[in-house]
Amino acid sequence: MPETIWPMALGEYSKDVENVAEVVLKTWPLVRRDFPWRHSGDPWRILLAEILLIQTKAEMVMKIYDRLVALFPTPCALTGVDTEQLEEHLKPLGLYRQRSQRLLRMAEYLRRVHDCKVPCDYEMLRRIPGVGDYVAAAVYIVACGGSAPLLDANIARILSRTVLGVDPPGRYMTDGTLGRLAGLLKWDRKLAYAFIDFAAAFCTSRRPRCNACPLRSHCKYGSRYV
Ligand code: SF4
């Protein structure tokens, strides 16, 4: 898919994106959710959560997360684990074969290359097998206190709808415009969680709650299509 044409100067988008982020942050106390991984600053626990959250609702992940962390508190605790045994733990989430393979490959790499630690370096995170741009950025921001452009389906949806007035393309991760929009913000843990919770409360994929949405006056999609 060709990259979306960048129709405006970056500076003009910058103000739009900042306004969106400001409203999202202000709304967070009203829509904030609590999950066990949000109480941790441990890079391995955050990485584990992010892998489990891929294409899966947080409420589902909650059901097995504490048990997995207790069983596998470090990457090394996971290395050498029997694949079928791990798959049994992951079954409630679905995609358990892929997830199990991914976790075992990751753990083995971390044992071999990083002495069983998750590195707090974006490029090193990105090199871990099975870790893509979003997961690397999420771990870097949430567990390491760094900042990197963060773009998951929720953030892509909010930015695309508010600023561009359209739904994001299916392959939003390779869409240069959305990546650049996300890159206009200085991401930290609070902003990341605020965007994710805002999407869950208002800007859902189907039937967004535009009539109740605090972003409506800033949103091209909400004012145009709803
Ligand atoms: S107005 Fe609608 S489309 Fe725009 S951010 Fe809010 S919920 Fe999403």
Image: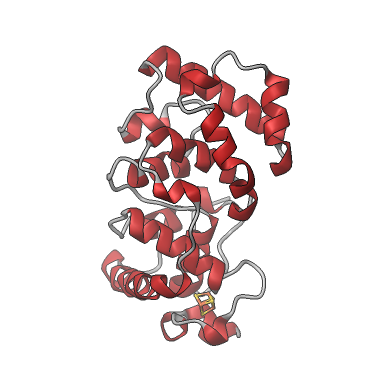
Relative to 45, does residue 212 appear above or below in the rendering? below
Identity of the residue drawn at 54% across and 56% down: 153
List x then y, in percent, for residue 166. Answer: 55, 71
Relative to 171, does residue 165 appear above or below in the rendering? below
List x then y, in percent, for residue 215. Answer: 44, 80
Identity of the residue drawn at 39% across and 15% down: 113
Q: Is residue 160 visible?
A: no
**Horizontal arrangement in the rendering, residue 108 relative to residue 137 (left or right):** right
Q: Nearer the viewer, residue 143 or 70?
A: 70
Count numbered badges in the picture: 0
* Rendering colour mode: secondary structure
**Horizontal arrangement in the rendering, residue 95 relative to residue 65 (left or right):** right
Residue 218, quarter of picture: bottom left
List x then y, in percent, for residue 26. Answer: 34, 75
Identity of the residue drawn at 31% across and 33% down: 120
List x then y, in percent, for residue 42. Answer: 37, 37
Q: Is residue 191 visible?
A: yes
In which quadrant will I find the C terminus? bottom right
Residue 181, quarter of picture: bottom left
Relative to 113, does residue 172 appear above or below in the rendering? below
